[in-house]
Image (cartoon, rainbow, N blue to C red):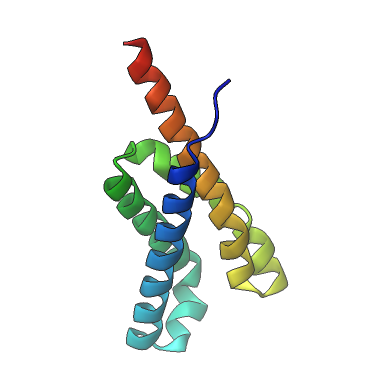
Amino acid sequence: MGEMSWPTFWRAGLLQAASVAVVAVALAVALPRSFFADWGWLAGPAAWAACALLVARLLRLPPVGVLAGAAVAGLPAILGVVTGEHWLGTALGLPVFALWCARLRRDADLSAEIV
């Protein structure tokens, strides 16, 4: 079993964090607080997934694989929702997402070597 792609880990984590932060600020400025009370359950995961697709595009990773990783990494968000600390879920999900992307890169590199 090979090493993870640590450059991909850092790039994916930082890109996801930055893009989620930009989207969160943009939505907070553009929409009333009541929107998040009613639609946050949908807006949060949709923003997380859209940002993950951006990461996939920028790092040239398979979009479906990255979305699967985004879904798995989104599971810690449940802890954030339950405790009322939504950013806790993001903080816990970022390294999971970055590790998933690092594994995708490693797997892609291994597949390229076999061919």
Q: Say if 36 sits above or below 57 in the image.
A: below
Q: In which quadrant is the N terminus drawn?
A: top right
Q: x%, y% of residue 30?
A: 32, 85
* Residue 50 position by quadrant: bottom left
The reply, left or right, for residue 49 in relation to residue 9 is left
Reply above or below: 3 against 15: above
Residue situated in front as seen by the camera: 106 or 54: 106
Residue 42 image point, x, y percent: 45, 64
Counting every numbered tag in the picture gives: 0
Q: Quadrant of the C terminus?
A: top left
Residue at 41 percent of width and 42 percent of height: 66
Q: In the displayed image of the protein, which residue is found farthest to the right?
A: 83
Left or right: residue 12 compared with residue 30:
right
Residue 25 percent coordinates (x, y) = 40, 80
Identify the residue shown where x is 41% and y is 44%.
67
Question: Compared to 6, does 112 lie above or below?
Answer: above
User: Residue at position x 43%, y 44% from top?
Assistant: 8
Which residue is painted at 34% across and 39% down in the image? 61
Classify residue 74 as left or right of residue 64. Answer: right
